[in-house]
Amino acid sequence: MLRAAWTVLRSTRTQAPALGLAGGGCARLPSDHWGLRSPPRGLVLPAARGYAIQKPVRPSQEDDPPPSTLLKDYQNIPGIEKVDDVVKRLLSLEMSNQKEKLKLKKELLMNKVVANPEDTSSLEARIVALTVKIRNYEEHMQKHRKDKAHKRYLLMSIDQRKKMLKNLRKTNYSVFEKICKELRIEYTFPPLYYRKAHRRLVTKKALCIRVYQEAQKLKKQKRALKAAAAAARKQGQMNPESSSTARPEAIKENQ
């Protein structure tokens, strides 16, 4: 088997054509020590351009910009539309790091929701920043479901945003409605009292209910006995003669 592979490799060395560039030179790849030459430039560039013009990745959120969006530093450069597709892709959002992506998403949502985007200390701006962070954590959790640290950060950010929305609802209800509508946040009213139900709590609650029912039964029996004693006392007060005659007869029977 090794001998057959060696013969095929020798035939490839001898039969491989010498492919050169248009200027007469040739670009060598690391496989030149086998006697093979790289394909000409005219074959490499279309492949790279085809890779650059591939279908855009579907955004995770509807508000997110497409991956082909240029970064903010390169959007206002004159003649950027005439640049090659490979260069555009290198300067686009797809090739940027996570920090630049989050920064661009935050700016777009700020311009869409907040009245003054430069005021980053307002309650609305902080809610927008937390929403961008929460969406980033959700995308991360879809890929890495067992990452408990990011899951904890996600739950903490959601609780913090709930508190901010609650305060905004009390202070400015119109802005609260606008933010919930633009960011598609479903605000649910928190319960008045909430306690997580576990086995110990359920058992304790059932025992307390049972003790309460038994105590109510005993109180009912005591009230019935007191009522019967009061009725007998009242009847004795109304007929004192019958009670006085009944006592000697009872004493004689006992003797």
Image: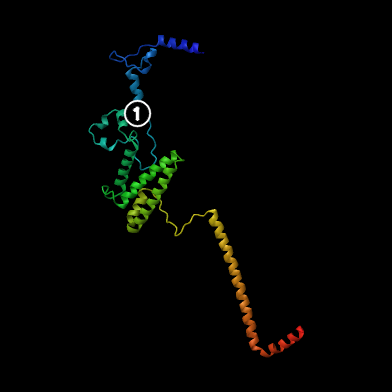
Name the residue at 56% across, 62% down. Answer: 208
Q: Residue 241: name its quadrant.
A: bottom right
> Which residue type carries mark 1?
Ala
- Packing grade of label 1 (10 A; few <14, some 14-19, many >=20) is some
Q: Position of residue 254 (x, y in %)?
A: 76, 83
Mark 1 lies on residue:
52
Tell which residue pokes out farthest to the front in this image. Answer: 255
Quadrant in which residue 79 is drawn: top left
Is 183 placed left or right of 231 in the picture? left
In-front residue for pair 205/178: 205
Tell me: residue 45, above or below residue 215: above
Q: Secondary structure at mark 1?
A: helix
Where's residue 229, x and y in %?
63, 80
In the foreground, 177 or 1: 1
Question: What residue appears at the point 59 percent right and 72 percent down from the top-left corner?
Answer: 219
Q: Residue furthest left?
A: 78
Count of numbered circles on the image: 1
Tell me what residue is drawn at x 40 percent, y 49 percent. Answer: 156
Q: Is residue 61 above or below residue 206?
A: above
112 displayed left or right of 224 = left
Query: Viewed as shown, does residue 191 lie left or right of 218?
Result: left
Which quarter of the figure is the C terminus placed in? bottom right
Residue 202: x and y in percent read 55, 57
Position of 112 with respect to 195 (left or right) is: left
Percent x, y for residue 32? 37, 14
Colour scheme employed for the rendering of this structure: rainbow
Name the residue located 34 percent from the left edge and 51 percent from the top edge.
Answer: 179
